[in-house]
Amino acid sequence: MAKKATADDELSARFHSAILHLLRRLAQEDRASGVTPARLSALSVLVFGGERTIGSLASAEGVTPPTMTRLVAGLVADGLVERDGDPADRRAVRVRATPAGRDRLLAGRDRRVTALRELLAPLSAKERRRLDQAAVIVERMLAER
């Protein structure tokens, strides 16, 4: 016997679909950066989270260290990150964003925010206030996890 969908099930499915469509639309702006999504994600961790080891970066991104080593090699080749030895552990490699990497990431963020602002523009003031309230709720949900 099939389980009857609850109001929460329906809300979750609608919210999931809306978020995926919004992210796909905004991802179009990321393609303008010329950097792959996986590299942009790793670069974002470095720009907003600071310097870290390859292992720590791999863990943050949910990939293996060899995979992260390849991603970092591409970012280094593009001049977006730098690698240095770790003075505390000669076997470890520390990675940090370059100024060019930070600029590229922030320019992409600006493009996404502009695209989102354009999507919000035709909404009424009441609808924008409701979205603001929804954003507060989503931020709280994520902070509580």
Image: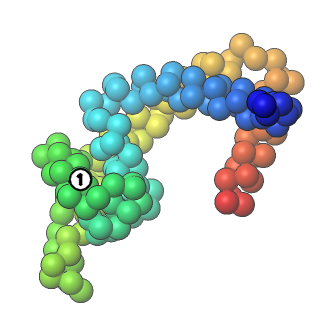
Q: Mark 1 belongs to which amino acid?
A: Thr
At x 34%, y 50%, the residue is: 43
Q: Is residue 67 left or right of residue 50?
A: left
**Neighbourhood count class around disc 1 (C-alpha, 10 Å): few under 14, some 14–19, many 20 upward:** few
- Coloration mode: rainbow
Across and down, in percent, residue 145 comes to: 67, 60
Residue 101 or 44: which is nearer the viewer? Answer: 44
Residue bearing the label numbered 1: 67
Q: Position of residue 36 (x, y in %)?
A: 29, 35
Rendered image quadrant of residue 6: top right
User: Which one is nearer the viewer's eye here, 107 or 24?
Assistant: 24
Question: Residue 86 occupies which quadrant of the picture?
Answer: bottom left
Residue at the extreme bottom of the image, as rendered = 88
Q: Residue 19, position in %: x, y?
A: 62, 30
Q: Secondary structure at mark 1?
A: helix
Residue at the far top: name it: 122
Residue at 68 percent of width and 18 percent of height = 121
Measured as percent of width and height from the top left, residue 120 is found at 68, 21
Of residues 121 and 53, the one drawn nearer to the viewer in this rendering: 53
Nearer to us in this view, 128 or 26? 26
Which residue does the image show at 34% across and 26% down from the upper left? 31
Q: Residue at x 49, y 25 (%)?
A: 24
